[in-house]
Image (tube, grey):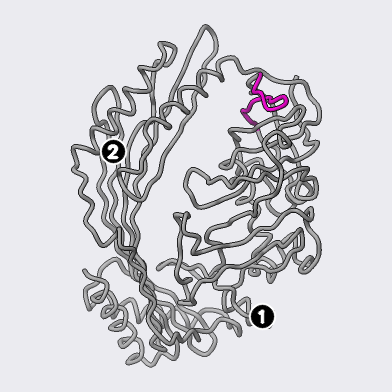
Amino acid sequence: MEWNSGKELCFQIIDLAKKAGIQECDVILQRGQSLSLQATKGAIDKSKITSTQVVGIRVIQDQKTGISASESLELDSLKMMVEQAKATSRYSGVDAYQSITQKNTADIILVPDRVKQKDPTSLQQKIDLAIRLEQDVLAVDKRIHNSPYSGYSDGEGESFYANHLGTFCYQKDRSFSAYTSALAAAEQAQAMYTSSSIGRSFAELDLGSCVKEASSVALRLLDAKPIPTGRYDVIFSTDEWESILSAHLGAFSAKAVKEGTSYYREKLMKSIAVSGLTMRDRPQYADGFSYSAFDDEGMPCQDLTVIDKGVLQSFFHNSATARFFKQKSTGHASRGAKGSLGVSPTQLVIDKGNASKSELYKGDVLKVIALKGLHSGTNAVSGHFSLALEGVMVKDGVEGQMVKDVTLSANFYDILNGIQAIGSTLEASSGRGFFSPEIRFSGMSVAGT
């Protein structure tokens, strides 16, 4: 199905809704296909090809919202979906703030040139890559006796949005990824580490980096041990810093503010971090893999400064929260074909600071490379977290003792005011949806020996 056929389908559903007497409605159509391969003992152990499509409608009648979805695009199924949404709306509560009002002057169509071309990579090339990853890891060192997770995946996704006012939006993208793990053992010690690579084309995948990182870190972790209990300056890897931040993003949600669960609900235009910290949501940041041209209400996406030099400048808004707070939507509406209206960021980017590597790692620093128990050990409302970690002690820029079997405890909202230095180089997370310089946090509590 070409995108213009998808457009016709969306407006066909809207016409069905109008004929059913529905006042306001919008439609989300999502389609995707993916391939995943996992290698074990020199052969493909698991393979999966998936193709998905789901369409959903949101209707609003007399300030009451109804939602329904269908995986079938047959006319009878679409008619039933519309009727179910209409029936559901009758029994929902009144919401004076949710309304479908986005009317764009032109369609938004985003299809990158690279996606317009068919991927030339053969299935055999993809199989060979997955097998090679496992074999290359096992060949690094005799202490690496297994690679439990080695594989390849790719996927292509399409997203359509249309509403009763004629707004239509469409975007399509494609990505490729590879990953491998190294399980090392020596005497009584055992350690494992996983590394991955993501690209916009098959050729962009960096297998050598995956193998080197997974094997070298796993081997070094064989000598890891606890460090004495105390307070340590900490620098998180980009992935682990993303995990900590993501667990607390509800604090920046206007929906959470409206519901009274955001820690920052009384902090707008007030200082919440050191003056050197600036955080933006950049939906069209070119290097990101969560690039978005529009939100799930059809609103064009634009950059948003969330924290500016330590001051909370804005929450993430959809149209309903914006109406409630008498603000403008920031274009962060989030809704899947089957889901209700929410709020979420796209690509968070933290501005670079001016600290050099030598300044960041002056003296003793604990570099955290893995956190465990994030969901069970984090209270997103209060900000308290207590997490097991793996890492390395760094002294004046030189890596020393690897660390494990210790617990890091802190409060997310406090550590933003305990930032000691912000690096001058922007680094991407492994999924390339988050970008941040290295940040040195002072005096975090570590329970060890």
- For the C terminus, the image quarter is top right
- Residue identifier under label 2: 37
Are the two marked residues, 2 and 1, in contact with CB atoms closer than 8 angstroms? Answer: no
**Which residues, given as a range, are shown in magenta?**
388-400
- Residue at 58 percent across and 62 percent down: it is 281
Magenta includes 392?
Answer: yes
Q: Earlier in the sequence, mark 2 or mark 1?
A: 2
Q: Position of residue 159 (x, y in %)?
A: 36, 67
Amino acid type at circle 1 is: Gln
Q: CA distance from mark 2 to mark 1?
A: 47 Å
Q: Is residue 138 left or right of residue 73?
A: right
Q: Nearer the viewer, residue 86 or 190?
A: 190
- For the N terminus, the image quarter is bottom left
Residue 37 figure quarter = top left
- Residue at 46 percent across and 87 percent down: it is 103
Q: Nearer the viewer, residue 118 or 312?
A: 118
Q: Is residue 39 above or below residue 25?
A: above
The circle on residue 327 is: 1
